[in-house]
Image (cartoon, rainbow, N blue to C red):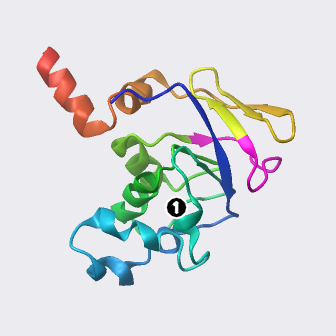
Amino acid sequence: MIIKTQLKGKVHKFGDDITADYIFAGKHRAKAENVLDLKDYVFNEIRPGFAKTVTQGDILVAGENFGLGSSREHATTLIKALGIEAILAKSFARIFYRNCINIGLPVIECETDLINESDIIIVDLKKGTVNDLSTNQSMNFRPVPESLWQILECGGLVNYLKKIGEEG
């Protein structure tokens, strides 16, 4: 899997301190044998029916400390399974950030106050830019570091390790 360097999608915006439990509440784990069958429960605690509003290529945007709390991997896996292509936030909980990278889901730390719900944005992961087509505003962020880009480009850490193992 090769990740695109430019992502274009509709914004789903959240505020500060969105916990992993808000993203996916543990009480839903027993409702399916396959974790991917649980994607309808993403954000169900704070935005019921959210999963039905997402289309492939959409982008999550949030405030400070996105993904804090438990290190539940279901949260990142299910966000990606919904079709979300990237998450932009002012800051991320460290474990959540790394879980996203490990599954090949781009996470960008940047200013998000000027981005609104349902805006259409273009994120250039290599150039470090966000262009909001709905408001005609542009923002810059530090581009994805090369070491993390290599993992994202392979579709996650497992695929990256397989690739370097084959090359070695």
Please say whether residue 111 is visible from this viewpoint. Answer: no
Question: What's the residue at 44%, 27% (across, down)?
Answer: 149
As shown in the figure, which amino acid type bears the numbered disc 1?
A: Gly
Give, as a single range, the part of the protein colored magenta: 108-120
Is 119 in the magenta?
A: yes
- The percent coordinates of residue 132 (x first, y second) are 78, 37
Q: How many marks?
A: 1
Residue nearest the observer in this picture, 85 or 125 = 85
Q: Residue at x 31, y 77 (%)?
A: 29
Q: Identify whether 39 is placed above or below 120.
A: below
Left or right of 140: which side holds 18? left
Q: Quadrant of residue 110?
A: top right
Residue at 54% across / 80% down in the picture?
Answer: 45
Q: Observer-nearest residue: 146 or 41?
A: 41
- The image position of residue 88, as x and y in percent, is 62, 46
Q: Is residue 106 found inside the magenta-colored segment of the image?
A: no
Image quadrant where residue 32 sits: bottom left
Q: Is residue 3 above or below residue 27?
A: above
For disc 1, the marked residue is: 67
The chief SS type of the magenta part is loop
Residue lying farthest to the top in this orientation: 167
Quarter of the image for the N terminus: give it.
top left
Which is more toward the observer, 79 or 57? 57
User: Looking at the picture, how far across and down is residue 94, in whole percent?
Assistant: 48, 52
Query: How busy is the neighbourhood of tag 1: few (under 14 within 10 Å), some, or many (20 plus)?
Result: many
